[in-house]
Every structure is written in structure tokens, then in C-alpha cells.
Amino acid sequence: MREKLDAILVDGEKRIAEAKTSAELQNVKAALVGKQGALTDILKELPRLDAELRPEMGRAANEVKNRLSAMIDARGEEIFLKASEIPADFDVTVPGILPAGGGLHPITQMCYDLNDTFRSMGFEIFEESDISSELYVFDNLNFPPEHPARESMDTYWLAGYENEKGGKRLCLRPHLTGASVRKMQGGKPPFRFVYPGRAYRNEATDARHERAFFQYEALVVDRDFTFSAGKVMISAILSKVFGREVPVRMRSGFFPFVEPGFEIDMQCLVCAGKGCSVCKQVGWIEVMPGGSPHPNVLRAAGLDPDEYTGFYVNIGLDRLAMMRYEIDDIRLFRSGDLRFLNQF
């Protein structure tokens, strides 16, 4: 057995010294001291030796194992250090190859720009899960029980919760507004916050509509926040995003969670208000609903509507990005087409 151990040690020293890469060294290690290695096979023979020889041979085998392990570790360190060395024939004057550059998705960039704008006005920014419940997306927002938005033709309800109600009936959020009630329930007024995120609706896709799209909602709640201040806020946001004054108009509109409610339009920047397929030839495009929180919404948040008021805006990030970059088809944002994305 002594001769076998000496042979393994000599062979191991040679193979370890000849290993050029970490992978080769790992193979040598497995062949020498691994579970199926040569040294392991020797150790399996110990029980068959005479009792008086076993301690001596056991110590000899452990000594060989320790020496081989030390040599493997040392060689591994040498290979690691050598990998970072510059070859002698390397020409440092040759220009390198510039790696492919990346960029932010246009909707992500739009979201970051809005974050900067609202932070400058003292707003807090938060996000919530894409999965919400009937309680927060409908009940707390003053949607009547028979409202069509509650049907599966509009909302993606999660399977297995069909017989549940309220907070136990889960869905992919069809809008962000329910998050505002949850946020207010966990704090104290006044509130000034925004919450970007993705929303989901069961509808046909076309140049202006997607099943999954990004929204950016803002809410101010205070004792003395006037409605006119809300319009000034909208104009300031759009001017900041587009770098110039943008014509805005507000039309009366109905949304269960606001009273009064408005459709807020901006002049179509794709056609400069002349009319195109994006704006349906009218020169204006709806970018956000808005209005004062409905008294029932404030009550759901634990606030007294006789004491507090405020202003909601729900910005369609996709449409805003379409205006900024003059894109005429919303489906391009999620096409994954690098010819489109490389423009940004």
C-alpha cells in the first residue's frame, strides 16, 4: 500500500502542475481525491489490512491527501492570478470593441420623468401589487353592484374566487385608483402622492388600446384644495413632460369615483391638432380622467367629505408616450421589435 500511495503522490504532482485551467484542475482533483478518486480507492482497502498496519497506513494516506489538496489549492490560485495577466504580445494601442448600448423603454423613461416632476412638487411615490380585490377596485370607489365594469367582459377575475365577494374576490387590477383608498387608510391627511403601475382590461387591441397598459395616478387630498388648482397642476405636468406649453381642455365626464368628473384632453402632437388616426381625426386625444374624489370614496378611506376635498388625475402613460415620440400605434411598445426600441 505504501508503494501505491507514493505512486499516487508522484502522479498527482505531475497532473496538478500540468493543469492549465480551473476546469482541468477540477478534473484532476476529482480523479485524485474525489469520491471515485484513486486515493479513495486506497482508503477502501484499509479494512483488509492487518490490524497493526491500519493506523500507520491511515496516517500515510491522510498525509498524501493533505499534500495533494494543498498543491491543488496553490495551483488554483496560480491559475486565477494568471488569468488576469496581460499577454506579452497584447497591443494596448489597438482600439477596443464598444459593447452594445442599452436604453430605457420609452414608457419607463416617461414614468421616470413624471416621478421627477411630481417629486419637485412634494409628492410621495409608491407602488402596489398588480393583484387587487373587488373591495378596492370597485366597492370602495363607489361602483354600483350592477356596473358593467365588474363583469368578466371587462375585468380579469382570478380563477377559484368566482363565489367570493369584496376583499376575498381577487382580480388583476383594471385601474390604479383602488390603491389610493388603501394608501389613505394607512395614513393621515393631508395626502399628496402618485402611484405608477400596470393595469389590465379584457378588451380588443387596436392602435389606441391594449389589454395590459401603464397608468400613472396622482391624488391630492386636503382641506382647501381648489378645483382650479387641479387644472393648473395638469398644465404644469404636461409642460414639464413635453418641454413646452401643451393645449389642454377639460370636458364633463362621469366616473363613479369622482364628483364632479372630467375627461382631460391634450392637443394631438402626432398631427399638431389637424386630425389623424391616433386622435380619430378630431385633433384631441384623451390622456386622463380627473376630478374631485367622490364623498363615498373619502368615506371608504376614513375621511369626512365635509372636511376634506382634493383632485384625482389618472394619466395614461402609453398615450402620453405616443404623443411625446409621435408614435401612431400603441402596440409597438410591447412588440419586442428591436428596430423600434433601438430608436430610444
Image (tube, rainbow, N blue to C red):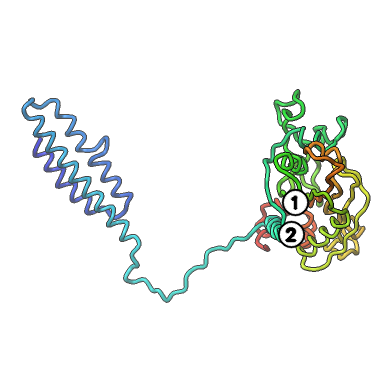
Q: Residue 270: x, y in percent? A: 83, 63
Q: Residue 34: x, y in percent? A: 26, 38
250 lies left or right of 6: right
- 225, 332: nearer the viewer: 225
Q: Looking at the image, is 88 positioned above or below residue 256?
A: below
Instruction: Count the numbered circles shown.
Output: 2
Identify residue for label 2. 121
Q: Residue 25: x, y in percent? A: 28, 49
- 159, 120: nearer the viewer: 120
Q: Quadrant of residue 268?
A: bottom right
Mark sitting on residue 246: none
Does the residue at mark 1 contact the one at mark 2 (Cβ under 8 Å)?
yes
Q: Residue at x 66, y 52 (%)?
A: 336
Q: Residue at x 15, y 37 (%)?
A: 61
Query: First in sequence: mark 1 or mark 2?
Result: 2
27 lies left or right of 11: right
Q: Is residue 279 visible?
A: no
Q: Secondary structure at mark 1?
A: strand
Mark sitting on residue 192: 1
Quarter of the figure with the N terminus:
top left
Q: Amino acid at mark 1?
A: Arg
